[in-house]
């Protein structure tokens, strides 16, 4: 039985004996996407589903997210999981601002995306009121497979991002909209 | 390590002449499982005082419940102690059944007991494995979560959801347990005791674990009672109060189980009480399966609340009207006030319901055990070192959803 | 378990000791409920705690209810429990005013601390003598007491939800 083992994604390039030449952007994208260090900002029930995703059955670590970093300075991917209340908003904003570029934000669960079932005076109706979000995962709570799908979409974004994106005027304009300098 | 003298909490007093350092155990912290903040006043490594701040996940459940009809409140109760949401759901259904004075068949009650004990096992698995993680034993967590996946599969067969289950209806269950659920339950009952025993051998008499957790965050029985502790935290302190025995509900009086009790109320006692409760839960589930009444009744006679079968809705006018009224939340509910409590994963979870005859509750108050016993946390950690404070917090099983509601 | 005779005994013992301060006694759903004058609540609870035949030494819960249409608008409800004999009791206190005042129970039950803070946060009921009466679950600079009936559930400044489509 022949088993076709392919590399995950092989960028286009020129191959020879002992060398492989390709674009720097492709290599950097490949390296970044397979070594995302998430910051699990787990607040409620979605946090428990994230723990199930990290556990052995669904294993997020095989996507390169082996090391969870709780320190914003050392994390790439901010995963906001659970309801964010108005009291927690400034904390989330501060954690986002402390992260170093390049950084991506994943909003997991209905509460983080839009406020979920809690249309109340104390719940922030979606974290995109205060920070820019890259990928939204709907669900209450989303199944671990959905979380993995969301992480894979982040990986696609990471792969295809140009290295100069964070310095472009469009990106800076978007940050200015949120009031992040 | 056992010879390091751990200060008793009452020995520690704030000295106004001394300068202490302030440490913020902030809302986002890897070791606090949930978001709550503690501002600690430290004398070197020893904690002298602590000021907790909660409310970072306040979602206004009680106000939200005043807006929703009775069957729509079940998803809210899911999110109280989300590690064991079926217990919350069953508690709410029983509260409403008490208000409307409904008769529930014995078979339904036994099925409810099985679901509640499974979720109690799930809750205690999380808490105990996380105590292990906080002492550095990550292996146990990964091993034990496999069994949690098995419990999730059983819930999925029954209600379709894993974590926030919305399981059951007022009056019983939405459908009879499918054959696959019974098969998975049997398989679970043969595999889980083996796995639990494996994990216990790893950690329970482990020298490092015992040294870390014995005498860590103790509380005496009198103090625990004065702070209105309930659940495993109170039983670890030595008081054998369990709502399943004191005010039996859902036929718990038919089952033979014991209540594990500790002596000192420290972290090791809380861990051991939860371990033993898991064994007792396994025994209760086995008894329920043995004694399960025959037949296939899965709901009681409450036409005002329980949706009629679809064939009747399409053919029978009365069933159509009931269906419409239940879905639109226009059922006639008697006025009255009722307090019902169940033994949640953390203690006495109480529902105080005041109905004025309208389609939504006039007032619904949740007596949340986490909220009430977390007030004793500053006292429990006075004089302890920072790492002991972290262990005390994780062994108290503070679930943020139940804390803030 | 608590029988009707036990309930009668407790009610009579309280009546004998406090006379007119006990305003009414009911048993909705077989749960003994006693309404007390608001000035006397602490004495009643202390008596229930100290008396050797009553022994209500466990405070289960404190909460409040708002009746905007009644003559006495706020009601604070205490649930007590006698763990030795397994008796439960509900005490109710009615009062009026924009910020009604009541004695704190923290000297008898340290566990009443956060329960009273929550009641203050949601309804604005002041507990005299409470060591730290601040808001606990809502943001500190909130001006209203949200669980009162006149205040809406939803956040009024949200832009993305169309109330007409939600039936409001």
Image: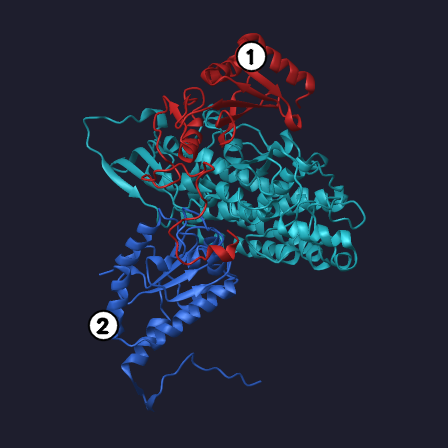
Disc 2 element: helix
Q: Is residue C76 above or below residue B210?
A: above
* Chain (cyan): B
Chain under label 1?
Answer: C
Q: Nearer the viewer, mark 1 or mark 2?
A: 2
Q: Where does the image place residue B9, in percent across and percent down from the top left?
A: 36, 28
On residue A25, which mark appears?
Answer: none
Q: Label 1 belongs to which residue?
A: C52
- Mark yes or no: residue B253 visible: yes
Give percent across and percent down for residue A12: 35, 87
Letter of the red chain: C
Residue holding disc 2: A169
Residue C66 as seen in the image, left or right of residue A104 = right
Chain A is which colour? blue
Q: Quadrant of residue A34?
A: bottom left
- Give percent across and percent down for residue B330: 64, 46
**Residue toward you, B205 or A154:** A154
The CA span between labels 1 and 2 is 77 Å
Residue B122, image x, y percentages:
56, 48
Q: Where the N terminus of chain B falls, by quadrant? A: top left
Drawn side of residue B29 relative to residue A173, left or right: right
Q: Is residue B385 above or below residue A61?
A: above
**Rendered residue at 27%/35% (across/down):** B41
Asked if B196 appears above or below C58 in the picture, the reply is: below
| Same subunit: marks 1 and 2 | no
Q: Residues within 10 Å of mark 2 (few under 14, many from 20)?
A: few
């Amino acid at each position: 039985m022949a088993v076709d083992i392919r590399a995950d994604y092989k960028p286009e390039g020129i191959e020879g004996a002992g060398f492989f030449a390709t674009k720097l952007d492709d290599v950097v994208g490949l390296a970044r996407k397979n070594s995302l260090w998430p910051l699990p900002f787990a607040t409620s029930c979605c946090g428990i589903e994230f723990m199930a995703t990290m556990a052995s059955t669904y294993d997020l670590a095989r996507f390169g997210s082996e090391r969870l970093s709780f320190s914003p300075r050392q994390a790439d991917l901010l995963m906001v999981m659970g309801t964010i209340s108005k009291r927690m908003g400034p904390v989330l904003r501060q954690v986002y601002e402390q992260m170093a570029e390049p950084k991506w934000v994943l909003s997991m669960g209905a509460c983080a995306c839009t406020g979920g079932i809690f249309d109340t005076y104390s719940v922030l109706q979606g974290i995109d009121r205060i920070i820019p979000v890259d990928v939204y995962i709907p669900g209450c709570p989303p199944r671990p497979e959905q979380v993995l799908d969301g992480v894979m979409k982040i990986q696609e974004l990471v792969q295809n991002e140009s290295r100069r994106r964070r310095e472009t005027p469009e990106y800076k304009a978007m940050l200015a909209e949120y009031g992040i300098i | 390590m056992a010879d390091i003298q751990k200060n008793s909490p009452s020995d520690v007093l704030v000295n106004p002449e001394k300068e202490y350092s302030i440490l913020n155990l902030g809302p986002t912290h890897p070791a606090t499982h949930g978001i709550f903040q503690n501002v600690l006043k430290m004398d070197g490594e020893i904690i002298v005082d602590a000021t907790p701040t909660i409310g970072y996940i306040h979602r206004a459940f009680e106000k939200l419940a005043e807006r929703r009809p009775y069957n729509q409140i079940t998803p809210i109760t899911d999110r109280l102690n989300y590690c064991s949401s079926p217990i919350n759901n069953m508690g709410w259904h029983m509260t409403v059944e008490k208000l409307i004075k409904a008769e529930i068949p014995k078979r339904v009650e036994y099925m409810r007991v099985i679901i509640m004990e499974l979720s109690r096992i799930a809750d205690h698995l999380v808490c105990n494995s996380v105590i292990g993680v906080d002492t550095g034993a990550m292996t146990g967590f990964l091993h034990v979560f496999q069994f949690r996946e098995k419990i999730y599969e059983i819930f999925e067969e029954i209600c379709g959801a894993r974590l926030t289950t919305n399981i059951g209806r007022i009056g019983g269950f939405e459908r009879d347990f499918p054959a696959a659920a019974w098969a998975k339950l049997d398989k679970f009952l043969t595999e889980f005791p083996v796995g639990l025993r494996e994990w216990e051998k790893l950690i329970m008499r482990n020298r490092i674990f015992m040294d870390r957790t014995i005498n860590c965050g103790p509380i005496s029985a009198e103090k625990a009672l004065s702070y209105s502790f309930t659940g495993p935290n109170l039983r670890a302190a030595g008081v054998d109060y369990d709502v399943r025995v004191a005010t039996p509900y859902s036929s718990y009086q038919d089952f033979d189980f014991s209540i594990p009790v500790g002596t000192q109320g420290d972290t090791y006692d809380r861990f051991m009480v939860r371990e033993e409760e898991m064994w007792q839960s396994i025994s209760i589930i086995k008894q329920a399966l043995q004694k399960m009444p025959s037949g296939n009744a899965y709901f009681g006679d409450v036409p005002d609340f329980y949706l009629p079968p679809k064939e009747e809705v399409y053919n029978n006018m009365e069933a159509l009207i009931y269906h419409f009224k239940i879905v639109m939340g226009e059922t006639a509910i008697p006025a009255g006030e009722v307090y019902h409590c169940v033994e949640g994963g953390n203690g006495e979870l109480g529902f105080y319901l005041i109905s004025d005859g309208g389609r939504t509750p006039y007032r619904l108050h949740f007596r949340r055990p986490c909220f009430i016993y977390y007030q004793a946390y500053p006292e429990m950690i006075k004089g302890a070192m920072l790492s002991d404070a972290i262990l005390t917090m994780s062994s108290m099983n503070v679930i943020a959803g139940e804390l803030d509601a | 378990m608590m029988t009707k005779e036990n309930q009668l005994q407790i009610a009579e013992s309280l009546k004998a000791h406090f006379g007119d301060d006990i305003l009414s006694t009911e048993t909705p759903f077989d749960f003994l409920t006693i309404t007390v004058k608001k000035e006397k609540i602490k004495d009643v609870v202390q008596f229930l705690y100290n008396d050797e035949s009553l022994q209500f030494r466990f405070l289960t819960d404190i909460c409040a209810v708002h009746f905007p249409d009644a003559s006495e608008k706020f009601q604070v409800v205490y649930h007590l429990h006698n763990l030795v004999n397994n008796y439960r009791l509900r005490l109710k206190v009615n009062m009026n005013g924009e910020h009604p005042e009541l004695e704190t129970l923290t000297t008898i039950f340290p566990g009443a601390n956060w329960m009273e803070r929550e009641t203050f946060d949601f309804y604005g009921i002041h507990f005299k003598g409470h060591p730290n009466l601040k808001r606990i679950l809502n943001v500190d600079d909130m001006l209203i007491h949200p669980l009162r009936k006149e205040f809406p559930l939803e956040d009024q400044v949200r832009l993305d939800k169309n109330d007409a489509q939600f039936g409001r």
